[in-house]
Amino acid sequence: MTLSQSIPNNVWPLQQKDVKKAMAVEGSSDHCLIPNITVKIVKSCPTTEKEWNKAAAMKNCSAYANMCKGTYMYHCLPDTHNNKLVEVCAEEEFIHLGSCAEFSSSALKIISNYKTNCSVFPNNPCPISYSSTTAFKYPGCFELKKSRNETQTTPLNTSSKVIDQTRLYHQNSAFYIHNVMSALKGTLCSLFLLLTYKIISLC
């Protein structure tokens, strides 16, 4: 499609500039840059289907239909490089091995982050394989600390609870041990006094 062709009616005025840019790029490149053009940093991602559909309507990815080969759909995911959440129009991908989905700004596509394991999340764990367009079902992926050196399995909001519970466990354990030692000390003192009394009686 060239710039001389008409822009679809469902393109909002603010998007027309981006659409023209995407059309121009498509005519001179083997790679569609619609994901790069539509990517936007956001503070949070939808966590319900209703919120996701509402955000998708606002993003209006359908405006880019036929600008590039493939179907570009609304996504809201972590970004691999910026450690941020982004909204983007990208092709649907299937995420495998129970990993979180994320947007690669270098590959301009949705990919699996194999450094994560959302299948073991205590709340809303993901299946072994799922569509990137259903990422809202696994909000724990939006809260993970990014790391390239270790597998992430605990969302931020649950890790703090785990830390608190662990601290409480240790505190309770210390209190229990203190009580046992005090009771043992009292018993030994009683035995010592009893033994002393017996010795004096024998004398």
Image: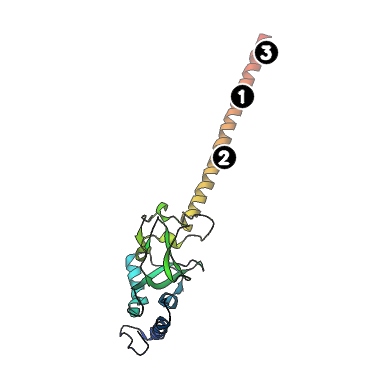
How far is mark 2 from mark 1, CA to CA? 21 Å
Label 1 secondary element: helix
- Name the amino acid type tagged 1: Leu
Image x and y of residue 32, in percent: 41, 76
- Name the amino acid type tagged 3: Ile
Q: Nearer the viewer, mark 1 or mark 3?
A: 1
Q: Nearer the viewer, mark 3 or mark 2?
A: 2
Q: Earlier in the sequence, mark 3 or mark 2?
A: 2
The part of the image, by quadrant, that contains residue 131 is: bottom left
Image x and y of residue 178, in percent: 58, 36
In front of the other: 84 or 24: 24
CA neighbours of label 3 inside 10 A, class few (<14), some (14 to 19), many (20+): few
Question: Which of the numbered marks, if any, corresponds to residue 188?
Answer: 1
Q: Is residue 84 left or right of residue 6?
A: right
* Circle 3 residue: 200
Question: Which of the numbered marks, if any, corresponds to residue 174?
Answer: 2
How far is mark 3 from mark 2, CA to CA? 39 Å
CA neighbours of label 1 inside 10 A, class few (<14), some (14 to 19), many (20+): few
Whether residue 122 is visible: no
- Name the amino acid type tagged 2: Ala
Residue at 37%, 76% (x, y): give it: 59
Q: Quadrant of the C terminus?
A: top right
Q: Is residue 29 left or right of residue 187?
A: left
Q: Is residue 48 left or right of residue 113?
A: left
